[in-house]
């Protein structure tokens, strides 16, 4: 990924935390997360967006920035496959209608200063384009309307509850948590408002993508194809 011109630090990122976090702090923050997902250099609690940009430029790894902590994305082959099929369905709906843009699991989004998340799929309506122009740059400064997370084995319930709160606090309107193992989808319109769908039901876009419908049996059956 190419290096972009960066604004002065005061406008780009929050200052480093005064206190580095301990292992106990991390366990309290994320739950029993696999240790390899936490970047130890820079020390947790002190990382900035500048550190994240350096990784994007020089390493083939994806990290999110949360409270000064660099957390590596966790996705296996099955999760990646589901994300692609779901993204294809969304693209077939969004594209012809010119509703906005879609990003994937390697598209960092700055939800606020010091908080960079990478949804497995995100939909950004044209009304949310920064300055009326489509998002650009290594890290797009934009809050999506829809954020989709394909839940992997390395994700902890505490981590995902925190991420859910962050999404809605930032202005996300709809969040889907997709569970490959149970073949269910949790559709959130608020942190405490959830509808759980099984593979016999149909996923819809609600007020964010009116008219979008996807039979979950069609989505999850992709995992069974030879």
Image (cartoon, rainbow, N blue to C red):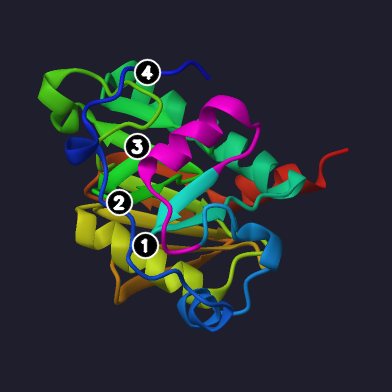
Q: Residue furthest left?
A: 131
Q: Residue furthest front?
A: 18
The answer to whether the residue labelled 2 contacts the one labelled 4, judged by CB atoms less than 8 Å apart, is no
Secondary structure, mark 4, is loop
Secondary structure, mark 3, is strand
Is any atom of residue 181 visible in this view?
A: no
94 sits left or right of 24 in the view: left
- Residue drawn at 50 percent across, 33 percent down: 54
Q: Which residue is mark 3?
A: 123
- The 10 Å Cα crowd at callout 2, few under 14, some 14 to 19, many 20 or more, is many
Q: Quadrant of residue 125?
A: top left
Q: CA distance from mark 2 to mark 3?
A: 21 Å
Could you tell which of marks 3 and 1 lies nearer the N-terminus? Answer: 1
Coordinates of residue 194 in the picture (x, y in percent): 36, 71
106 sits left or right of 221 in the view: left
Could you tell which of marks 1 and 4 lies nearer the N-terminus? Answer: 4
Q: Which residues are magenta?
A: 44-62
Coordinates of residue 198 in the picture (x, y in percent): 56, 66
Q: Which residue is mark 1?
A: 67
Q: Which residue is mark 4?
A: 4
Q: Closer to the observer: label 2 or label 3? A: 2
Coordinates of residue 59 in the picture (x, y in percent): 63, 32
Q: Which residue is mark 2?
A: 114
| Residue 197 located within the stretch drawn in magenta | no
Q: CA distance from mark 2 to mark 4?
A: 18 Å
């Amino acid at each position: 990924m190419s290096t972009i011109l960066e604004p002065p630090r005061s406008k780009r990122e929050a200052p480093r935390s005064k206190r580095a976090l301990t292992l106990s702090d991390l366990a309290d923050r994320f739950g029993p997360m696999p240790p390899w997902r936490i970047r130890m250099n820079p020390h947790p609690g002190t990382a900035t967006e500048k550190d994240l940009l350096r990784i994007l430029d020089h390493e083939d790894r994806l990290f999110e920035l949360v409270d000064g902590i660099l957390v590596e994305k966790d996705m296996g082959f099955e999760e990646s496959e589901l994300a692609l099929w779901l993204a294809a369905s969304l693209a077939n709906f969004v594209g012809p209608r010119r509703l906005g843009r879609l990003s994937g699991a390697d598209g960092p989004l700055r939800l606020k200063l010091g908080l960079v998340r990478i949804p497995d799929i995100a939909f950004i309506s044209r009304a949310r384009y920064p300055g009326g122009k489509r998002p650009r740059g290594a890290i797009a400064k934009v809050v999506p309307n829809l954020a989709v997370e394909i839940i992997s084995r390395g994700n902890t319930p505490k981590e995902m509850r925190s991420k859910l709160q962050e999404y809605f606090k930032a202005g996300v309107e709809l969040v889907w948590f997709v569970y490959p193992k149970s073949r269910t989808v949790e559709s959130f319109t608020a942190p405490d408002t959830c509808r759980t769908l099984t593979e016999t039901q149909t996923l819809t876009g609600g007020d964010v993508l009116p008219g979008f419908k996807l039979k979950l049996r069609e989505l999850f059956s992709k995992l069974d194809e030879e």
